[in-house]
Image: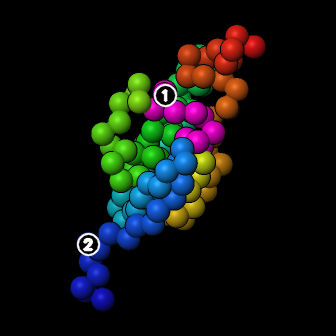
Amino acid sequence: MKHLVGKEVTKEVDFMEEKVSIRKLTFGQIIELQKQIKAVQTKPKSKKNEEADSMELLRIVIGAGVIGAQELSVEDYQSFPPDELNNLATEVLNYIGLSTDAVEVDPDVDVDGETPMGN
């Protein structure tokens, strides 16, 4: 088994009608990911920062598990449909064996706290 140390395990998933590669995380990376998620979840809440926190959770999970996502800016994330980001984060969490309960963004709310199309 020693030859498997450091091996990266990946699979392709759909995102925005394209294929992206997600990767399994190491035990240490999962612990760090959980710490980052908990830090966001335990911040004091207000309506405005709830939407920003949801986006931050998605960025943390996608950044950790999607190859190439580390290079994306906040503005890049804001340009994607929320349901696509949710689906991708869910794929990552399922692939690494974590619960998906904490990482959801309401598709009817943008990161500025307003509903799309002024609804």
Disc 2 on helix, strand or loop? Answer: loop
Q: Which residue appears at 51% of the width and 38% of the height?
A: 57
Q: Residue furthest front?
A: 17
* Magenta stretch: helix, strand or loop mostly: helix
Which residue, given by chain and number where applicable, does mark 2 sit on? 6
Is residue 10 shown left or right of residue 100? left
Amino acid carrying label 1: it is Ser
Looking at the image, is mark 1 or mark 2 nearer the viewer?
1
Horizontal and vertical percent for residue 19?
47, 55
Question: For residue 20, what is the image quadrant?
Answer: bottom left
| Magenta-colored stretch includes residue 85 | yes
How many tags in the picture?
2
Label 1 crowd (10 A; few <14 / some 14-19 / many >=20): few
Horizontal and vertical percent for residue 94?
57, 61
The residue segment tinted magenta is: 77-86
Which residue, given by chain and number where applicable, does mark 1 sit on? 79
Tags 1 and 2 touching, CB below 8 Å: no
Amino acid carrying label 2: it is Gly
Horizontal and vertical percent for residue 116?
67, 18
Q: Which residue appears at 61% of the width and 17% of the height?
A: 113
The image's colour scheme reads rainbow
| Magenta-colored stretch includes residue 6 | no
Label 2 crowd (10 A; few <14 / some 14-19 / many >=20): few
Q: Which residue appears at 54% of the width and 44% of the height?
A: 16
Q: Is residue 116 above or below residue 103?
A: above
Observer-nearest of 79 and 6: 79
